[in-house]
Image (cartoon, helix red, strand yellow):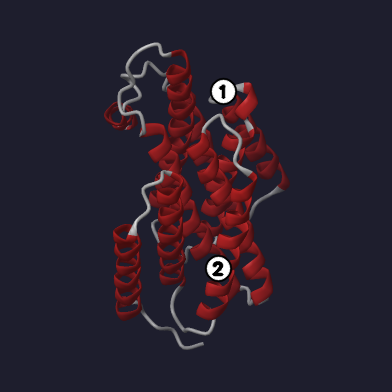
Amino acid sequence: MCYNVLEVIGLKCLNINMYRFIIPSLLFFALLKSVTENHGLSLETAVLSALIIIATSFLNSPKKHRLLPIIILTLVFTSNLMFIFNLKNGYPKNIFLELFSFIFLLALAGINIFFNQRRQQKEKETEIKSPNLGHNLIKSVVLISVFLWAAGSYGLYLNLELSIHLLMLIILINIIFSTRCLLKINFASQKIPAALWFYPFLFGLIMVELVWAISFWPIERLAVGAIILANYYVFWNILESRLKNSLNKKIIFSNILFLAIVIASLLFSSQWEIR
């Protein structure tokens, strides 16, 4: 099944060794399984997870750009953990573990394809099929991680009665690193202009204020994660359009309309929990 999916997204046509993705993804599944069965993250599991992330990053990226995949895979791993810790008894945990392992596989595939395509563009070897495939895979994985991180951390905030300031700090860290990753894949091998380093912190502060406001609402964690994701997606989409010199009033209006529809739908359809 995994082979067929990878073939569909284009790995086979790019002549990429798929075992670089399948084996680490199976190891990732085993790690998540261990965490759920032991009801926590042990020191041994944390060390092994770090080694897998570093090793797979080295296998799937050039020497000069290994920090980016390490950050992406760390975001995937930590967001998955936060979400898993919130799964109640009775939920089909194995289905979630398989889904998260597939997301990890897509992250590895996106990283490898992204750097392969950049190398081909630089060397002008052959015509590149689906030139934005790697970029889009990484972007999708980062956005999924934003949702899982927000929903998971908000669930921990509710279940463990954490301080709202700690929750805001957790969200801030995630948004800063997620935005940094998205900026990096947009500039490929170039350095990110100094002026753009303001945006990860700006987006982080906006999401932090949003989380603080949401904390007064009695809504479930999945709705909170979806609201954070929708807002972040819109802000990033506008910034990305600006980076591509394609920003106009139509794009701004369509994004704001999309955000309003999503938030209204979530608020009307979500289960409100008085606490």
Image quadrant in which you'd find residue 202: bottom right
Residue identified by numbered label 1: 59
**Point 68% across, 69% down: residue:** 166
Q: Is residue 78 visible?
A: yes
Q: Of residues 230 and 245, which is closer to you in this image? A: 245
Sooner in the amino-acid sequence: mark 2 or mark 1: 1
Q: CA distance from mark 2 to mark 1?
A: 36 Å
Query: Would you say 177 lies left or right of 97 here?
Result: right
Q: Position of residue 14 (x, y in %)?
A: 36, 19
**Point 59% across, 37% down: residue:** 68
**Number of numbered markers:** 2
Q: Residue furthest bottom?
A: 274
Q: Of residues 193 and 264, which is closer to you in this image? A: 193
Query: Would you say 55 lies left or right of 96 here?
Result: right
Q: Quadrant of the N terminus?
A: top left
Q: Is residue 103 above or below residue 116?
A: below
Q: Residue furthest right?
A: 43
Q: Residue furthest top?
A: 125
Q: Of residues 249 and 236, which is closer to you in this image? A: 249
Amino acid carrying label 2: it is Ile
The circle on residue 36 is: none
**Point 42% across, 68% down: residue:** 227
Q: Is residue 34 visible?
A: no
The circle on residue 206 is: 2
Query: Would you say 23 lies left or right of 52 here?
Result: left
Give the label, 2 or 1, closer to the camera.
Answer: 2
Image quadrant in which you'd find residue 259: bottom left
Amino acid carrying label 1: it is Leu
Query: Would you say 160 lies left or right of 11 here?
Result: right
Q: Secondary structure at mark 2?
A: helix
